[in-house]
Amino acid sequence: MLFGGPLRYDTGWAQYEEAFLQLGFRSMLKRLPALLAASFRLARQADRQAARIVVSAEVGRGIARAVSLLAVNGVLGHLMTDAPVADRLRGAAPALVTVACVLFLAALLRAVSTYATGRLEPKVERVATEQYLEKAASVELSAIEDDAFHKLLDTAQYGAASARRMIGIATRVVNALISLLAAASVLTVLHPLLLPLLATMTLPSAWSALTIARRRYVSFHAWVQHARAGRLIGSLLTEAGAAPEIRVHGVGPFLLRHFRSMSEAAEEEQARLARLAARTGLIAAAWTGVATVVTYATLGGLLLAGAMALSVAGTAVIAIRTGSSSLDTLVVEINSLHEDAMFVGDLERLFVEAEQRAIPVGGAELPAEPREIRFENVTFRYPGTSGRDALSDISLSLPTGKIVALVGENGSGKTTLVKLLAGLYAPKDGRILWDDVDAATADRHRLAERIAMVAQDFKRWPFTARVNIAIGRSSVPLTDDRIGTSVGEAGAGDVVADLPRGLDTLLARAFTGGHELSGGQWQRLGIARAAYRRGSILVVDEPTAALDARAELEVFEKIRALAGTGQTVILITHRLASVRHADLVHVLEGGRLVESGTPDDLLRTGGVYAELYALQADQFTAKVPSPNGHAER
Ligand SMILES: Nc1ncnc2c1ncn2[C@@H]1O[C@H](COP(=O)(O)OP(=O)(O)OP(=O)(O)O)[C@@H](O)[C@H]1O
């Protein structure tokens, strides 16, 4: 099956299983105060005033219900006496007025609570989502590439919606709790037998709701990656980037087949859950039925035996109905609260883990104008990969203010080396020294400030051309001067001039008014972005891969000019002719440094560089067959 099987258990799974094991009814009740406190904390963070209003209104509603129950008891007490009807009614009147007033007040409080909850819920979701996104953006690249962390990101994204739901649920829990307390106290006063009977009637629904929620949560975690893969396939079918290949290579039916088989597997799981839920519900209903019969039979027995007055039995019936409906609500709502709290728990777990894997803040100051950056016996392997190191025992110098070229065949480690230089990864062994400051101890944010990078797969932001350039340093105010200079430095003037609305053209074909650039045009904008950033070290990874011959020459000219202004240029390229202007060339092979020197030195000594150079040169000097069959130079 594409993307592996539906159930992939990795290290992250063990933690979910532990969370699942905590899902007992007792532990749920024990955790209730903490859960309510957590949702209240979130609510206060989002909107303190609305949170206070909701809590006060719900407590008020609960109390109102308790008072009305006691008042009803008073009404029945007066009505079910032997006195004349008029006297009975007169006696019951004050209690009736109390019931009416309390019901009116409860309705008012309900309206207040509805309004404040409605105001609060979206804010809670926004605050939680913001925190989620902020944490996701602040972790190390290695965390983003780690599939266990990614799974956590996947599941935690539901935490914000759960946090929103928890607000409404928490209000209903508080309300039902108070009203249950009222019913239970009334029942205890009426007859001690009635309380356990009430509990027996409600236990089955508690058990059934809990069992169903447990299954749903476990299933969700087992299937979350499957669902992501399914969504990914679905989006591939509609994505503009994949559209040409889907049509020319006829990939559509292939992707659809996989989409269907993945969806069918997920449907089977849904059907399995529904089957189990139906069975559980049926068992619970039978159990409740028996318990209800026993309860009313007991009431009848007490009446027949003269152990209970008719008015008391009437109140008991009302209290049992109120109590069991409150208990039902409570069980269902606590259960939902718990289920949602587990997703909020995932979000909190993400916060903790993201904190641990965050790019550290602070550290040693880097020299303002270092003479060189030295790699000292640097070894690196990508986290979670086995096999060979991507870089092994590399020692080399990157003198500042010069053009240093990194050369080597595909997969030799050039990009990895510059990622380490930029602080995106840390070496497994060895050090990267900026003069004598170890980059591992340096302030990472300050280090990144110094670097401008045109990566091989630099981001094509779905924004305007202007923003696509200025996003190179979004922390400074955007000025036309700076944009203009950068466009000039990158030789992107023609690209911008050709755009229908110049710099204000939206570069996202999928949106109205959006425009698409060619690969080479994008590459020029990417270089303009790096120029706009004005880092002291410019890293360009294959800057001319998509450029035509004339543009390529021009771009290298521009890059040389940047080095002339004091910028250090680290250039990765397979076009060895362009490397001839570099001050220093490092040649990598299989993650090891095999040669270093000026281009002329390397050509003279005749190693890997000279060999690759000769191969490329041969392509241009090879004899071109003439029309009459003789080879010509
Ligand atoms: N994010 C990653 N996770 C795991 N392995 C990676 C990752 N990126 C690169 N590698 C591996 O590290 C090795 C070096 O890759 P790198 O991208 O540094 O090579 P390169 O010299 O830049 O190649 P190219 O000329 O094709 O761009 C390769 O074996 C590659 O498979």
Image (cartoon, rainbow, N blue to C red):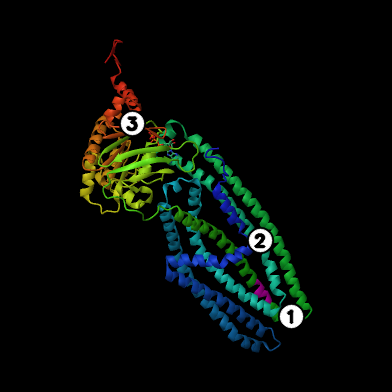
- Residues rendered magenta in the picture: 316-321
Residue 87, quarter of the rendered image: bottom right
Does the magenta run of residues contain 234? no
Question: Residue drawn at (66%, 84%), measured in percent from left and top?
Answer: 77
Q: Which residue is mark 2?
A: 207
Q: Earlier in the sequence, mark 3 or mark 2?
A: 2
Question: Residue drawn at (53%, 74%), measured in percent from left and top?
Answer: 59
Residue 497 in view here: no
Name the side, left or right, on which 614 lies relative to 169: left
Q: CA distance from mark 2 to mark 1?
A: 32 Å
Q: Nearer the viewer, mark 3 or mark 1?
A: 3
Q: Nearer the viewer, mark 3 or mark 2?
A: 3
Badge 1 element: loop
Residue 606 in view here: yes
Q: Nearer the viewer, residue 589 or 80?
A: 589
Q: Amino acid at mark 2?
A: Trp
Mark 1 crowd level (few <14, some 14–19, many ≥20, 10 Å Cα): some
Percent position (x, y) of residue 616?
32, 24
Percent position (x, y) of residue 398?
31, 40
Q: Which residue is mark 3?
A: 574
- How many numbered dots are placed on residues in this image? 3
Q: CA distance from mark 3 to mark 1?
A: 97 Å
